[in-house]
């Protein structure tokens, strides 16, 4: 994206199907760890994707990208990240989803920003980094045009908006009560993608009202459908229909652990809408799935 305004236009609901998935933790796989730049690059070879990432703070105040508060599951290290310096963390190696050690290091958030500029959209979760600190990181890297925050609730969204009204956010709007609360917050709807649940809402009226405000909606499948898909080498018709039903229901974006399988499944034959073509001008080439 060339500007924050263009990022908002890309995700503004127009009624056209948006051929983008959100890659949860970047979309790990065999040989491809979570929150790893090599994994991000591989995901983007398979389709259009936002990259959801997780910042953590080191003992010496540096921000790295890793999901867990401890090192044991995803690296060759042990113990809490906050007890390690950046230099110590850089001696470790990341593990893939099978627990196998790779050659990849833990990236800093700055390294991810530098890599992503001009090629990717980042979605930055909170973990132990505050709204204010994440806003400062985006501003430090002039990344308002290609990075957004997961703000969670209305209070956090309002804080982010007051600090920098150019930053887009993913905000939890699971029901009409939360929609009404957000409506009263003073935050522009154009700054928001509405996360409607890991158990996606079946309230079509909620989805209609969000669309009426120009808001695209997103739901997670990492805790349900993805688990069934991960156990299969292919996709049976019943499981495929469950993913497609989410789109038919009015959910615009899917956050998935399996972006390299989901994007070809849902969007391989979908034309880029005219309203979004200026933003998605290079169609990814199909790759062999991981």
Image (cartoon, rainbow, N blue to C red):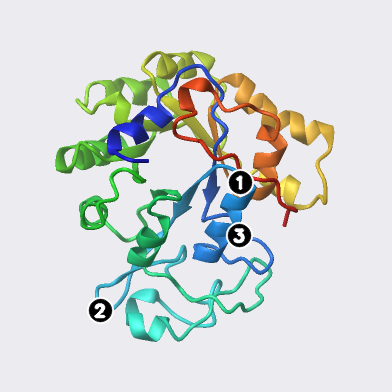
Tell me the distance, in whole angstroms, between the alpha carbons under discs 3 and 1. Answer: 15 Å
Q: Is residue 193 left or right of residue 76?
A: left
Q: Nearer the viewer, mark 2 or mark 1?
A: 2
Tell me the quarter of the picture where residue 62 sits.
Answer: bottom left
Tell me the distance, in whole angstroms, between the alpha carbons under discs 2 and 3. Answer: 28 Å
Q: What residue does disc 3 label?
A: 28
Pointers 2 and 1 in contact (C-beta within 8 Å): no
**Residue 84 is at least partly visible in this image:** no
Q: Nearer the viewer, residue 276 or 21?
A: 276
SS assignment at label 2: loop
Q: Nearer the viewer, residue 102 or 4?
A: 4
Q: Nearer the viewer, residue 142 or 256?
A: 142
Pointers 3 and 1 in contact (C-beta within 8 Å): no
Q: Residue at x 22, y 21 (%)?
A: 184
Q: Is residue 240 above or below residue 31?
A: above
Q: What residue does disc 1 label?
A: 223
Q: Earlier in the sequence, mark 2 or mark 1?
A: 2
Q: What residue does disc 2 label?
A: 60
């Amino acid at each position: 994206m060339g500007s924050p305004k263009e990022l908002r236009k890309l995700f503004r609901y127009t009624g056209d199907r948006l051929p983008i998935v959100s890659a949860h933790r970047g979309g790990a796989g065999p040989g491809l760890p979570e929150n790893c730049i090599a994994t991000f690059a591989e995901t983007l070879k398979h389709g259009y994707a936002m990259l959801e990432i997780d910042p953590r703070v080191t003992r010496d105040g540096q921000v790295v990208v890793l999901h867990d508060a401890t090192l044991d599951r995803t690296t060759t290290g042990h113990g809490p990240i906050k007890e390690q310096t950046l230099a110590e963390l850089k001696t470790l190696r990341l593990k893939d989803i099978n627990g196998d050690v790779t050659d990849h290091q833990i990236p800093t958030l700055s390294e991810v920003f530098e890599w992503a500029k001009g090629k990717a959209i980042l979605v930055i979760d909170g973990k132990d980094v505050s709204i204010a600190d994440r806003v400062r990181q985006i501003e430090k890297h002039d990344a308002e045009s290609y990075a957004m925050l997961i703000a969670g609730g209305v209070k956090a969204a309002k804080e982010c908006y007051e600090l920098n009204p150019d930053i887009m956010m993913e905000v939890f709007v699971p029901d009409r009560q939360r929609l009404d609360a957000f409506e009263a917050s003073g935050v522009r709807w154009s700054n928001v993608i509405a996360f409607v649940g890991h158990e996606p809402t079946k309230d079509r009226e909620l989805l209609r009202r969000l669309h009426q405000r120009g808001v695209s909606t997103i739901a997670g499948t990492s805790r349900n459908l993805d688990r069934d898909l991960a156990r299969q080498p292919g996709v049976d018709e019943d499981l495929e229909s469950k993913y497609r039903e989410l789109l038919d229901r009015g959910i615009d974006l899917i956050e998935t652990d399996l972006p390299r399988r989901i994007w070809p499944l849902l969007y391989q034959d979908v034309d880029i809408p005219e309203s979004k073509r200026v933003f998605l001008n290079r169609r990814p080439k199909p790759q062999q799935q991981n």
